[in-house]
Amino acid sequence: MKTTRYKFEQTVQSATAKSIDWLKEEFRAILESDKDYTRKADYIGFSVLSIDNRIQSLDEEIKELQELKKSLKTAKEIVLTTGAEIFREYGIDKLDGSGISSITFTGATTADKTKLLVHDAEALIEAGLYKKVLDEDMVIQYYTNDKYSEVIQSNAQLEVISTPKLAKIKVNKRKSANNDTHIIKKEVA
């Protein structure tokens, strides 16, 4: 179990657009330190990987919280319906409180939802109950294959939108069985 959170690990986990200059200085301090290059790589790499560990931990917590929320909603529904059954058994319509206003009994109701079951789709289509939708994927495919090129080029055009991707460093994990937990032995900078 990891018990120490190092300076660079804290820096990368709290990086924002406003802290880029600070982050650059931290990178420089590590790279210019007199430590061995493998220690520098491990220090930077494990600090960056700590973000993945935090994200994974949060994903697990979110999943547990979603399960807890679902369980609590189920428990609430059971309590409310059981309470209604007991209120009806005792003939109680309303129970006033001092901390809460009151608890009221509401009888059973039905919720209606309309669902269409089609027996003859062709007859409905012939009656005009349909809509035409352009298949954009097919247009792009035919545009690049020169099929229907005259019609497509006169009625449409392809626009390529390029989104620049910034240069990044990548932390490559070692492919070993004991790489599940990342522990930084000593702080480098």
Image (cartoon, rainbow, N blue to C red):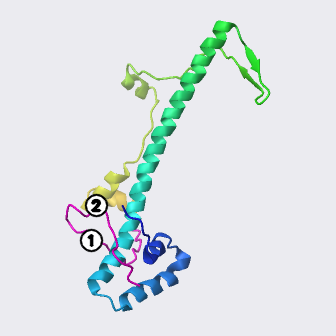
Position above or below: 36 against 141: below
Categorize mark 2 by other alpha carbons within 10 Å: few (<14), some (14-19), many (20+): few
Instruction: Pinpoint residue 146: horizontal percent, then vertical percent.
Output: 26, 61
Magenta stretch: includes residue 169:
yes
Q: Secondary structure at mark 2?
A: loop
Q: Residue at x 45, y 37 (%)?
A: 131
Is 59 in front, or is 184? 184
- Describe residue 181's horizontal placement relative to residue 100 as left or right: left
Q: Residue at x 35, y 57 (%)?
A: 151
Asked if residue 45 shows in the view, the reply is yes
Whole-angstrom CA distance, mark 1 to mark 2, is 13 Å
Indicate which disc residue 172 carries. Answer: 1
Amino acid tagged 1: Asn
Q: Residue at x 52, y 22 (%)?
A: 114
Q: Which residue is mark 2?
A: 180
Indicate which disc residue 5 carries. Answer: none
Q: State which quadrant residue 182 falls in.
A: bottom left
Q: Residue at x 50, y 80 (%)?
A: 20
